Amino acid sequence: MHLMPLPSSVQSGQGFLAVDAHFHAGMSGTANPRLQAALDRFLMRLDRQCGNIRRMQLTAAAGDPLLLNLQVAGTGAAVQSLDEDESYKLAVTPTQATITAANELGAMHGLETLFQLVNISDGACRVPVVTVDDAPRFRWRGLELDVIRHFEPVEMVERTLDGMAIAKLNVFHWHLSDDQGFRAESKKFPKLTSDAAGGLFYTQDQLREVVAYARARGIRVVPEFDIPGHSSATVLAYPEYGSGEDLKELPLVYESPRAELDPSNEKTYKFVDTLVGEMGEIFPDAYFHIGGDETEGKAWLANPRIKAFMDKKGFKTTADLQSYFNQRLLPILTKHGKKMVGWDEILNPSLPKDIMVQSWRGVDSLSQGAQQGYTGILSAPYYLDAQKTSEQMLLDDPVPANTRLNADQQKLILGGEICMWAEQINSDTADSRIWPRSMAVAERFWSPQSDRDVEDMYRRLRIASLELEGVGLTHLSGPEKLRRNLAGSTHPEALEVFASVLEPVSFGDREDTQHTDWYTALDRLVDAVVADPPARQEIEREVNAYLEHGPGSAAAEMRLRQRFEAFQHAAPALQAWALRSARLADAGQRARQLGALAESGLEALALIDMHTPPLAGWADGQKAVIADAQKPSALVRFVFLPSLEKLVAAAGQGSAATQ
Ligand code: ACM
């Protein structure tokens, strides 16, 4: 079984339910259009997997027994809420699969689980007999997507939602306004998109389409309009709400935020009121994200009128002024039936407890908020552009076992959100940054706290990754396409070998070397490799198996030798490409290092095999090779250096040779 996210309880039985031409599906409880559409989608996917399913479904006779029975007690809320019951039970016997749920949200989760249980054996599709009793650990399981720094077309957003449904994520946080653009059409303030979107925005019909698409998949959409900072686009379009900035064009260089709305101006609140009213109808969710991050207040302090306002009110810092702004915002949101969500910076005792804080600066601010009685969600460890491993992100828990929060405070942590910022991605590469790692975070949000088996997570993640590609995501095919394009070859084998052991450096490390902006081409080696590629964990496992001398030792050695030989063959070809191609020019040094690392690996294997201690100086020589490969180059880093270090150390000691 390869269920992901892992359910709270799975009990396996004996036997199988056949999924064949007799697989009639239907409902014995509540039927409603959302549930029917979910069942239709499920059957279409099942048909692609197994064949014959959908046609038979359509021709099922009235009296045919149901092989899949959805027993759903009631209909979900007209506007999906945080408090809805998402639990389900799935019981598979040799004659029937039954999904029991309170509403269609649970039923949809049950269908995703059932889909993952289908396997093919002897050419026939079947589901093992099993009982799954499952419910999410956290109610807020989100993914934030920045569509400002690079725009994402509706198709990309929709396939992201398809992936989220598989991952049982239930909140799509759509970052729709920032310094570099305003991406949601406003009829009340048309200049927001005519003057401050560079032609790239969603029409109101498209926004509604996405909300409906998400709802159909059990996903809430929380829009974010980032104020009072990160507001250059708004201030460019409507300088009258700004703080005196003189903007001539959209800032397409990603720098610290510039323009800020003017909190001392009553017209600013009228503007926000009208905008929240308009957007609040398009986005019916109870929560409305006001951003609030990184408001430096430079423009406020530079404006004598605003400075005088601060003095009059007795505000000592720009944070005081921002807190005043938020206090003025709150009744506006309430009037439109919205609850306030904002980034860390909105946390201030002057605000009532029913706001929610999204913690991006660290776990501490989340705990501090909870200790003061505020609800919160955690994002700091789940920034995808930090390029962390799935392992690291799985293990980072919104409420870790050793939390110092008491039981009531823990209940205030509603969950978390993955964040995908777009300074360094575009629509060709976004999928490969989001998936499959988001699946590991989704598991953290859904599955029990005790679920910390990294090895098993990776086993399931590899399979989930294919399932995600199967619904149209391009996290595997996108980088493959880019690598073909980079190499100018339909079979760029050397580049495939190279990419299998490289990953992008973190956002900050890339930023230090390459300050991307709107015009930067994101089509280099760094864009064609992915964080935490499978080879990192595979090589680690192989080195461990080899050095432990267990039954898998010989196979692991063979695999390692094949890898190192493949690196050795790839290195000269890559070096030649680097000389030939401007887009690969910076990769020459890494290519040379790949060859040197391969040599270290092969020598280490030979020494251990021959039970021979190395010549004096050998280990130091290899350490130097590894240290050289650790130096920054080409915005990518090797993922197997710790494993190679371990192998070289074993060879250096000669100790692993004692068998
Ligand atoms: C943020 O990353 N500025 C929320």
Image: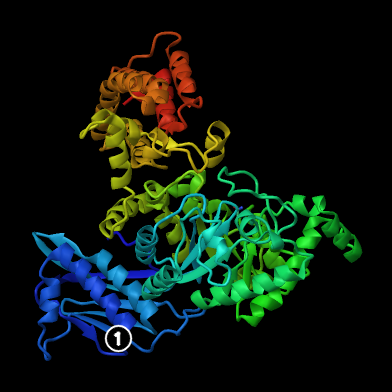
Q: Which residue is mark 1?
A: 71
Where residue 524 appears, as percent x and y from the top left, is 39, 34
Q: Nearer the viewer, residue 61 or 10?
A: 61
> Can residue 357 be seen at all in this image of the molecule?
no
Looking at the rendering, which quadrant does residue 370 occupy?
A: bottom right
Residue at the image position 52 percent from the left and 76 percent from the top: 285
Looking at the rendering, which quadrant does residue 335 occupy?
A: bottom right
Q: Residues within 10 Å of mark 1 (few under 14, many from 20)?
A: many
Left or right, 161 with reference to 333? left
Where residue 320 appears, as percent x and y from the top left, is 81, 61
Give the quarter of the figure containing the C terminus. Answer: top left
Q: Nearer the viewer, residue 367 or 508?
A: 508
Colour treatment of the image? rainbow
Q: Is residue 329 above or below residue 586?
A: below
Looking at the rendering, which quadrant does residue 541 occupy?
A: top left
Q: Is residue 323 above or below residue 649?
A: below
Q: Nearer the viewer, residue 435 or 544?
A: 435
Q: Is residue 598 above or below residue 242?
A: above
Q: Determine the secondary structure under disc 1.
A: strand
> Can residue 649 be seen at all in this image of the molecule?
yes
Residue at the image position 29 percent from the left and 21 percent from the top: 568
Left or right, 628 with reference to 401? left
